[in-house]
Image: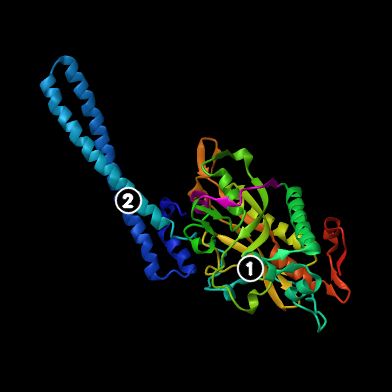
Amino acid sequence: MLQLNFIRENQQTVVDGLKKRNFTEEKLAVLTQVLSLDDQRRQIQTTLDGSLAERNKLSKEVGELFKKGAHQEADVIKDKVNQLKDSISELESQLKDTMDRLDSLLLTIPNIPHESVPAGSSEQDNEVAQAWDKALPVLEQQALPHWELASKYQIFDLELGTKLTGSGFPVFRGKGARLERALISFFLDEATKAGYEEIMPPLMVNEATARGTGQLPDKEAQMYHVTKDDLYLIPTAEVPVTNIFRDVILDVEQLPVKMTAYTPCFRREAGSYGAHVRGLNRVHQFDKVEIVQFQHPDKSYETLQEMVAHVEGLLNKLELPFRILRLCGGDMGFTSALTFDFEVYSAAQQRWLEVSSVSNFETFQSNRMKIRYREGKKIQLLHTLNGSALALARIVAAILENNQTPEGIVIPSVLRPYTGFDIIA
């Protein structure tokens, strides 16, 4: 959530940033509403503060008059105090209503893009920040897409998942399940080697937690909601892990805080149909290892590059062709100031598949969650960052397709100590 002072003091910057996110003039009217409500809040607060001070002053006078035995005068002032109490109660109600309306509006305003974010309205406008500079793998004519390989080698079963739950819930079997577990272990080991503390968080969160990282209200339609208990299945480990420090003040010496977590992720992905979402290209449940950092504002973009390099290292070790995109304003997530997407090349489908997003949210999430740091006598909001390191579904798809041979699917050498086998045959 943007800070009110930032909006008030940097109105043109906010307008320009929202325009980069394709906000129309009509949508930009929310800024006028926010500032008007904030003016109203300030006026009510000033009046309330004055009334409270007057009440305290008169209450003190009543006490002194009673001590002197001037009961009649004291009763007159006491009536004024009671009238002030009614007025104060009304002012407090007005203030709460105004602040609730103000917060509701602020929750609808996305983060302001970093100056390096390109303008654009969709994924076609994303900028290739790092291209793959080697030859892309070319398969034999009889090469199969991963969903056919899965059937041939009994790696995962989409039909069984549909029987058990519904479409988009794959069941991994045999060596496919072992490959999935190997990737999770490999990604976690690499993260802990890089200094991230491993966390095993809950898979369901309450509304406050989902709101803190920006899933609510922006992505409510994509989340699975357990209505009876008012809990949400997590779409990413970012949600519970980042909220660990909600309402916490860290000492500057503790920064950066680095955490990693493996979790299944649940996303409704409503309205996703067609050939481009076949197999593991888009599912409702998938495994992912997430990396999260809490960092000093002066160092967060250096940290973002460090996290990008970490994901790059994983893909190099898996020997997968990849490219890095800098997302445009129109394709970037609601809470992000700058996002780099990683895409791996799917040789059988001859298309790029997104496998990671690495983002800096600056103070947008920390303002919602009141995650702060103390430096000397100052207490300020810190910056939050996270990245997929990595999302497994499409990684598995690329490994299966790119490494298929007439003899079977060759396992990347870095995974063999984890799988215990070299080939799925």
Mark whose residue sits in front, 2 or 1: 1
Task: Indicate left or right for 58 with 32 as reference.
Answer: left
In this view, the residue farthest toward the front is 163
Residue 132 percent location from the top left of the image: 74, 72
At 54% from the left edge and 40% from the top edge, which residue is drawn? 248
In this view, the residue farthest toward the bottom is 141
Quadrant containing the C terminus is bottom right
Gap in angstroms between the C-alphas marked 2 and 1:
43 Å
Residue tagged by mark 1?
Answer: 168
Question: At numbered mark 2, what does the secondary structure look like: helix, strand or loop?
Answer: helix
Residue 304 in which image quadrant:
bottom right
Task: Indicate left or right for 295 with 41 as reference.
Answer: right
Give the numbered dot on residue 98. Answer: 2
Residue 391 percent location from the top left of the image: 68, 61
Task: Indicate left or right for 147 with 43 as reference.
Answer: right
- Amino acid bearing label 2: Thr
Residue nearest the observer in this picture, 381 or 173: 173
Marks 2 and 1 in Cβ contact (< 8 Å): no
Q: Which residues are magenta?
A: 196-212
| Vertical comparison of 100 with 89: above or below | below
